[in-house]
Structure formats: structure tokens, C-alpha cells
Image (spheres, rainbow, N blue to C red):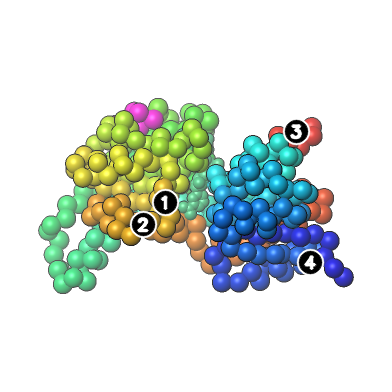
Amino acid sequence: MSPKFRVALTDYNFPNLDIENEVLAKEGAELIAKNCKTEDELIEHIKDADGIIDQFFPITRRAISYLNKCKVIAVYGIGTNQIDVTAASEKRILVVNVPDYCIDEVATHAVALLLDCARKVTRYNQLVKGGTWAYMGLKLHRFCGKTVGIVGMGAIGKLVAKKLSGFDVKLIGYDPYVDSETMSSIGVRKMEIGELFIESDFITLHLPLTEQTRNLISTKLLGAMKPTAYLINVSRGGIIDETSLLQLLNGNRIAGAALDVLAKEPPEDRCPITSHPKTVVTPHIAWYSDESYKELRFKVAQSVADVLNGRTPRSIVNKNIIKGS
Ligand SMILES: NC(=O)c1ccc[n+]([C@@H]2O[C@H](COP(=O)([O-])OP(=O)(O)OC[C@H]3O[C@@H](n4cnc5c(N)ncnc54)[C@H](O)[C@@H]3O)[C@@H](O)[C@H]2O)c1
């Protein structure tokens, strides 16, 4: 029997698509996969699709204007910043994400990067591998009693607070949409962002990239940090103004930064941020574990199949387009 639906996959970096194919085939849908390189190629690929699955490729207003019968755009992951959600909503196309496949992984990765700043595990490892066996040369400070600032107190920010609660550190948080009672119930004192940057010894970012948050962390906030403080980012690269960050690192105005995400990924060769001696960088893998990887792929395919077959998917980004909501 020929499939009822055609689902276009715009780009992917998985070795195969077994999980997606299995889920969609059971639901009467065929997956047509491509790694699109240009917007025109994307438009040709998606224009007659019933559903779209996207990994990183930008789905612009122009691309959306060509869609003839698409009901759903699903993204591999939490952040939907590469999709023009407003344009999709105007065409009554649901945008769905997978908000809960890697909360534990990302929170644990933020804590791992933070502890690496505190204990310099990766720097000492480099020294030992280079033949140096000594404690001097790098300066460490006692971790307990320090202040950790959490910017963005959603699912991941809250779990970071929980994971750090055993370390005897002071937790402060900034999130305009989370009240002080909710924060204090998990041991976090709510503050304004400017104050948080002044007070913190470690600052960890867990907010989405939006037009309001792009380059939010720039000279004004970075310049307010203690010269001994560290910045950790596992959210999105575009939230930090990297030119300002480099100036502050070069001027010894902050102690260092640990980053899982960059404004441009993958970075250019000889990127001044990745090669800087005061940074620790991982290649956008905070989300990754064998378990989260399988869960992500299963859930994204299932969400598309749900919409195509008239069921409510697990997580809708533009709920406002559903009648009665
Ligand atoms: N590195 C990775 O592999 C990886 C994986 C998953 C998610 N992420 C990123 O982590 C982000 C957070 O994920 P989550 O599951 O906690 O999302 P979430 O929606 O549960 O929480 C985000 C929080 O940020 C807050 N927020 C919004 N604007 C803000 C602002 N201007 N200042 C401070 N806070 C603000 C929101 O109120 C919300 O509480 C995602 O948007 C995504 O970009 C990265």
C-alpha cells in the first residue's frame, strides 16, 4: 500500500534513519531525507510535504510561503530558533519540539563544565600529558561557599540548582518569568540580572535564544563580573556577544569561560574562542547520551505521525494557533 503522507527531512547528522523510518512507516508515512545546502534546494524538497522534520537548517518565512499542504514542522530538540515560528503560525502550521529528551544530560554537562572551571581538570590533564606533574602554575580556590548565578530557571536551570544543592554553594537566579517563591522553594534567591553578574563566582546560562536574548550577555554584564568569575554556556551561542567575551578574556577581566555552544557552529579554523587558553569548549554535545539520542529521534518522528493522523502531539510551540486555546 502506498504511504498516505510524505515527510521531508531537511538535514541530519545521524549515521542512519532507522528509528524515524520505523515509527513513520507504522503510521502510514514515508520519510524523504536530504541534507539541504541552499534555501532553494530546501524549498524544492519541502514544498509538497505533509510534514517536515528539521535538525539545524533554517526554515525561513520565504521557505514557509511555498508550503502547499504542510501540517507540521518538527525540530530535533528543544530550541526552535532556526524556524520562523510566526510565519508558520500565519499558515496554521504546527511547530512541535521535543522539550524533555535531554534535561538531565544538559544540566549534568553544565555542572561538569562549572566544576572543570573550579578544579581545572582538563587543564591539569593537558599538563600531565605534556610531561608536567605539579600542582603549582594553576590557581585553584575552594568551591564551597561560592556563589553560582543561574540565568534562565526553566527545566534545565532548575535541575542545575538541584544538582548543585549538595555542594554547599549559594544559588542565585534570574528569570523574568519565574517568581521568587518558586525559586526559593528550590534554594535559589531571585535577583535582577545586573546584580547576579556582580555577585556570582560562576554564571551558568539556561535561557532560550530569541530576538530579546540575542547578544544579551555583552560588555555591560560581562564587565560587571568579578575578575575571578567564570561564565558557563550550554544554552545557545548567540546569547553571548563573543567579541565582548574575547576582549574581557584577553584583558584578564574575567577568569574564563566554559562553552558548549558558539555563535557559529562548527567554528572557523583558528577560532579565537576555541583556541583561547582561558576557555574550555565542547562541540554542542550537552544534549548527548546514547539514551537521549534514541529518545529524541523516536519522539520527533512520533510527534509528526501524531499530527498527520489527527492526534495531539506531545509538545506544541505555537499552541496559540489551535482553536479554543
Ligand atoms: N547544548 C545543548 O545540547 C542544549 C540541549 C538542550 C537545550 N539547550 C538550550 O537550553 C535552553 C533551555 O532549555 P530548557 O529545557 O531549560 O527550556 P525552558 O523553556 O524550560 O526554560 C527556559 C527558561 O528561560 C527563561 N527565559 C526566557 N527569556 C529569558 C531571559 N531574557 N532571561 C532569563 N531567562 C529567560 C524562561 O522563562 C524559562 O524559564 C533551550 O532554549 C536550548 O536553547 C541546549
Look at the image and tell me in which quarter the N terminus lies: bottom right
Q: Is residue 194 magenta?
A: yes
The magenta segment is 193-198
Asked if disc 3 and disc 1 are in contact, CB closer than 8 Å, the reply is no
- Mark earlier in primary sequence (4, 3): 4
Density class for disc 4 (Cα within 10 Å; few <14, some 14-19, many ≥20) is few
Q: Secondary structure at mark 2?
A: loop
Of labels 1 and 4, earlier in sequence is 4
The answer to whether marks 2 and 1 mark residues whose Cβ atoms lie closer than 8 Å is: yes
Q: Give the residue at mark 4.
A: 26
Q: Secondary structure at mark 4?
A: helix
As drawn, the residue found furthest toward the front would be 40
Q: Is mark 4 within 8 Å of ligand 1?
A: no
In the rendered image, residue 289 lying in the magenta stretch gets the answer no
Which is in the foreground here, disc 1 or disc 4? Answer: 1
The crowding category of the residue bearing disc 2, from other C-alpha atoms within 10 Å (few below 14, some 14 to 19, many at least 20), is: few
Residue for badge 1: 264
The label on residue 268 is 2
Instruction: From the viewer's perspective, tell me whether residue 174 is left or right of residue 58.
Output: left
Q: Are the residues flagged by discs 4 and 3 in contact, CB closer than 8 Å? A: no
Q: Is residue 286 visible?
A: yes
First along the sequence among labels 3 and 2: 2
Q: Residue at x 15, y 61 (%)?
A: 135
Does residue 197 lie above or below 22 as drawn?
Answer: above
Residue under numbered circle 3: 325
Q: Nearer the viewer, residue 295 or 252?
A: 252
Q: Residue at x 70, y 47 (%)?
A: 66
